[in-house]
Amino acid sequence: MIIDSHCHLHDAAFADVREAVRTAVACGVWGIVAVGCDPGTNARTLEVAEVVPKAVWPALGFHPDRPQLDDEELDRVEAQVAEHHAGLVAIGEIGLPWYSLADAADAADRMVTGRARLERLLALAARFDLAVILHAPHGAAQSAFEALRRHGIERAVFHWHKAPADVTHAIVDAGYLVSVTPEVVYRDRDRALVAAVPLGSLLVETDAPWPYRGEFDGLPSGPWLASRVVEEVAKLKQLPVEDVTFEVSSNACRLFELPWR
Ligand SMILES: [Zn+2]
């Protein structure tokens, strides 16, 4: 059985979360790590996890690429994590800004702010011994990697990972995980990543309800797509789907210290 390691179940697309989980289970996806982005989506994530506690494991986060979020909201997220840490499997998603810096006149300032915020959040992860789900794409990956090391964080995943090959190599070498989305079905960059990384360092995720292209064009995006990701990873690794399912699910159990491990 498969675990979707990163899904936005707080989103309005999953208003009927029981139905979303039923569909996922019917596709072989029986566990979902639900991530939050800010105080509001964190609160909704906690609600969702209470509705279907057997299938949903909550993580609370502060999205680094949302420039509208301010320090007051970060204070609130810190308070949420402190209050609920015993019921969480991770802090996430957190990380460093990248996409929002592209056209920003104050990109350098925002990067400084983003780094300071990540420091606070990693200190919190270390304090409560929580796994870390990182949003740190491309040029942000190296700095996030260094920040993890500085804080002595041992359990972390670089979600929807994309980075230069040498940075990926260092990340995997240090024992951190990287995850791939349904893009792996049709995008060479993600396929090359799967080929380059050992199975023991891989997770699958959907980042749903993110809309995907290729064969997914026009189809509803949800945690059920994680089964298609596993199938494609199996093809790329030339291994039986059952073996890959077992491996990536074991990786998720190890990372998030899931209770049934
Ligand atoms: Zn996400």
Image (cartoon, rainbow, N blue to C red):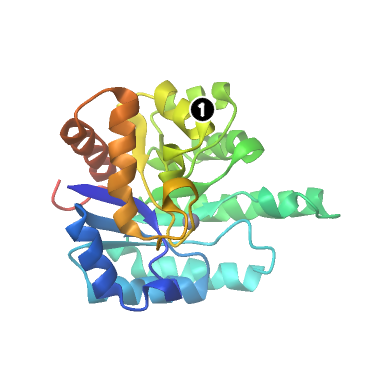
Front residue (pair 157, 248): 248
Number of on-image labels? 1
Up the image or down, 24 lies above or below 231; here it is below
Amino acid type, residue under disc 1 in the picture: Thr
| Residue 154 placement (x, y as % from top left) | 39, 37
Up the image or down, 141 lies above or below 34; here it is above
Residue 44: quarter of image: bottom left
Q: Left or right: where does residue 36 sit relative to residue 19?
A: right
Residue matched to label 1 = 168
Q: Left or right: where does residue 207 sit relative to residue 162?
A: left
| Residue 124 placement (x, y as % from top left) | 46, 56
Q: Secondary structure at mark 1?
A: helix
Front residue (pair 177, 182): 182
Identified at 50% across, 41% down, the residue is: 151
Which residue is farthest left?
260
Identified at 56% across, 21% down, the residue is: 166
Identified at 47% across, 46% down, the residue is: 214
Q: Left or right: where does residue 78 sit relative to residue 108?
A: left
| Residue 219 placement (x, y as % from top left) | 41, 60
Can residue 181 be seen in the rendering of this structure? no
Front residue (pair 68, 90): 68
Can residue 249 be seen in the rendering of this structure? yes
Q: In the rendered image, which quarter contains the C terminus?
A: top left
| Residue 102 placement (x, y as % from top left) | 76, 49
Up the image or down, 48 lies above or below 186; here it is below
